Image (cartoon, helix red, strand yellow):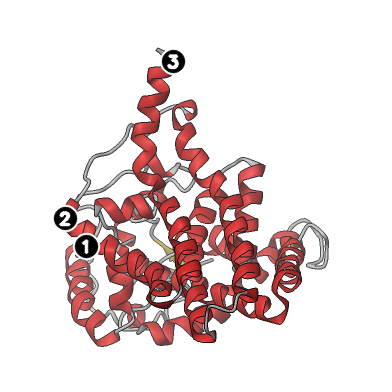
Amino acid sequence: MIASDTVARWQSAAPFWVSYLLIPLAWFSAIHGGWAVLLLPLVTWYLFSALDGLAGLNLENADPSTPEEDLEWYKALTIIWVPVQFATVFTLIWYVSGTDHLSALEKLLMFFGVGVITGTIGINYSHELMHQKSRLERSLADILLAMVLYSHFRSEHLLVHHRYVGTPRDPVTARYNEGFYRFYPRVLHQSLVSAFRAEAARLARRDLPWTNTANPFWKYWVLQAAMLILAYALGGWTGVGLLLLQAGVAIWQLELVNYVEHYGLTRKHLGEGTYEHVQPRHSWNAAQKVSNWLLINLQRHSDHHYKPDRRFPLLQTHASDVAPQLPYGYPLMTVAAMAPPLWRRVMNPRVRRWRAMYYPEITDWKPYNEMTLPLPR
């Protein structure tokens, strides 16, 4: 009975382990070179989008009261990924820096693909881990984020985004009609500043200065420095350049997803700096089956904001009359986001329908479009 239960649990979790297939693909790309260096982005963006079209939607919901012991294979998925990604990134830095069968362009394209993995999978898994109560899982989230030199994402996401989503105080809520190329530089700056200020304010409430060692930014800086030093030790300045390249691509992948998740969706201002509570209608969702396997149900984003510490297999999908739905999964929608005219043609009518459906009483949307409403208290 115990063995059969274990097998059943593994079979349930197995589709979500599809991300691990990208690791041997990365090594095939590095060893083979040539056209193979394009495989990682092509598979991650386009193959999974094509498979979404074939597999359709998954509208089933797991029992949210499922006990922790029944989720062992789901938990293992995100925990094991950390040493796997660490070994992959730094072994590839050593290998690619020293090989002579790859041209400079092939090396750059190779680590562009590595950045697609560390952004699409690694940062996403860090997001799952940082929301858990276990100190081990939170520490593993920090290691994943340090590998892409974006450690402050944990502070920004937990202390700023979840509290202020859909309001002018949340940097990563994309404004209506704001193209990705305006959003991206804005969010890079504002997210770092807001994360640092949030941690400083948290310390100030304990009568401690920001320089206190309790400020996680000290840990962030040490971990990131260690990653850079290790890259230099393995590959010299070429190794540092490759690490920086994959980090830049990973950050870009993260912010593309952030852009998609809340584009144009704002919480109603109730007056005097107060806003309605976060509702399922304040996040874009996608029920595409295969991309939800790849992204461990990140596309069930409304439920994540409702229950941030709910593990990914228990996240619930919502009907279209409860939460707005994207026409395609995140992989294809992030590609569309990089073409602002196409994005606006696809998404702006959906935002306008969303407004008419949930907020017919609001006649002047200009303050919401420009996010010029009073800051939340």
Q: Residue furthest top?
A: 1
Please state the horizontal and vertical placement of residue 341, each as a whole percent of the image. 24, 87
Determine contact: label 1, label 2, CB under 8 Å: yes
Residue, disc 3: 2
Residue name at image x 39 percent, y 55 percent: 295
Tell me which label, 2 or 3, sits earlier in the chain.
Answer: 3
The answer to whether any part of residue 155 appears in the image is: no
Residue located farthest toward the front when viewing the structure as drawn: 101
Where's residue 63, x and y in %? 33, 31
Quadrant location of the C terminus in the rendered image: bottom right
Task: Look at the picture and state if 152 lies above or below 109.
Answer: above
In the figure, 71 relative to 347: above or below? above
Q: Nearer the viewer, residue 97 or 256?
A: 97
Can the viewer see residue 89 in this picture? yes
In the image, taking residue 225 as reference, residue 120 lies left or right, namely: left
The answer to whether residue 172 is left or right of residue 89 is left
Instruction: Point out the image quarter for the N terminus.
Output: top left
Which of pointers 1 and 3 lies earlier in the amino acid sequence?
3
- CA gap, disc 2 to disc 3? 35 Å
Quarter of the rendering containing residue 133: top right
